[in-house]
């Protein structure tokens, strides 16, 4: 870490925009904690350079059909070869995290499996609940999400739009990230 203001390089992969909104809010809170941020979107055709000089690199990715978006998975492979694990944090955005106890690496199946598959032991790993927006989904996606919601006891009314993201939890997360970059050796 330098004597300048600490900095977190945030990379995110979002399909429907909620992960983008979450990292935007994280950046706002981090700014209030005196931590600078850069935000870079990961897409199918963009493979941005890893900002290995940042004090921490945060990778946030949405889940679709059980997996984090491919752009995030590809980026993580590069990230790991350029930045030590202790300077990596990951955030998974999914609907399972709407339930109590599913915001941690132990409690969230997607996050747990991602870390297990990659063998990554990041400085921080968290799951944040995303958004359910049936009217915005294509027919097939709506059917599939309704099926998942039936199994998991969630809403199935096709008119349902719910932002499950707990913004207080997002603020708490920013506090933890700020602590990491202000106290890390
Ligand atoms: C087609 C589709 C598939 C999804 N699959 C899952 C899933 O397998 N598990 C889950 O918990 N959430 C799932 N979700 C919910 C998304 O993770 C949630 O809507 C999140 O907010 C999406 O983030 P984004 O808006 O940044 O793309 C799915 C959503 C869609 C539209």
Image (cartoon, helix red, strand yellow):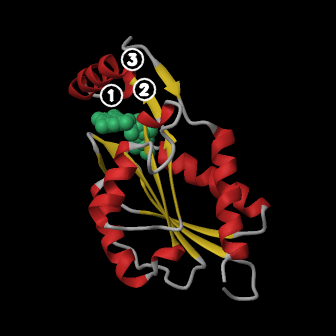
In the displayed structure image, the side of residue 139 where residue 177 appears, left or right: right
Determine the residue positioned at 78% across, 63% down.
Answer: 33
Per the image, label 3 sits on a secondary structure element best described as loop
Q: CA distance from mark 1 to mark 2?
A: 7 Å
**Which of these two is toward me, 182 or 35?**
182
Q: Is mark 3 within 8 Å of ligand 1?
A: no
Left or right of residue 19: residue 138: left
**Residue 44 x %, y %:** 28, 60
Secondary structure under tag 2 reads strand
Asked if one can make out residue 71 in the rendered structure from this viewpoint, the answer is no
- Spot occupied by residue 155 in the image (x, y as percentages of width and height): 41, 15
Badge 1 is on which residue?
137
Seen as rendered, the residue at the extreme bottom is 2
Kindly report the distance in space between the C-alpha atoms of the residues bearing marks 3 and 1. 19 Å
Q: Earlier in the sequence, mark 2 or mark 3?
A: 2
**Mark 1 and 2 residues: CB-CB less than 8 Å, in contact?**
yes
User: Is the residue indicated by label 1 positioned so its CB lies within 8 Å of ligand 1?
Assistant: yes
Q: Which residue is mark 2?
A: 133
Instruction: Tell me if the residue at label 2 has its CB under 8 Å from ligand 1.
Output: yes
């Amino acid at each position: 870490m330098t004597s300048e203001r600490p900095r977190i390089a945030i990379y995110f992969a979002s399909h429907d925009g909620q992960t983008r909104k979450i990292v935007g809010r994280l950046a706002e809170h981090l700014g209030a904690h005196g931590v600078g941020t850069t935000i870079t979107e990961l897409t199918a055709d963009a493979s941005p350079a890893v900002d290995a000089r940042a004090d921490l690199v945060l990778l946030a990715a949405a889940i679709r059909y059980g997996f984090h978006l491919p752009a995030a998975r590809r980026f993580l492979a590069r990230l790991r070869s350029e930045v030590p694990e202790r300077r990596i944090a990951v955030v998974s955005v999914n609907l399972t995290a709407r339930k109590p106890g599913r915001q941690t690496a132990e409690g969230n199946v997607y996050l747990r499996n991602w870390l297990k598959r990659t063998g990554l032991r990041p400085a921080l790993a968290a799951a944040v609940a995303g958004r359910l927006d049936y009217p915005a989904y294509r027919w097939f996606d709506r059917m599939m999400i309704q099926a998942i919601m039936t199994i998991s006891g969630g809403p199935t009314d096709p008119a349902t739009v719910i932002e499950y993201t707990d913004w207080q939890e997002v603020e708490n997360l920013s506090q933890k990230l700020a602590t990491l970059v202000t106290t890390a050796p």
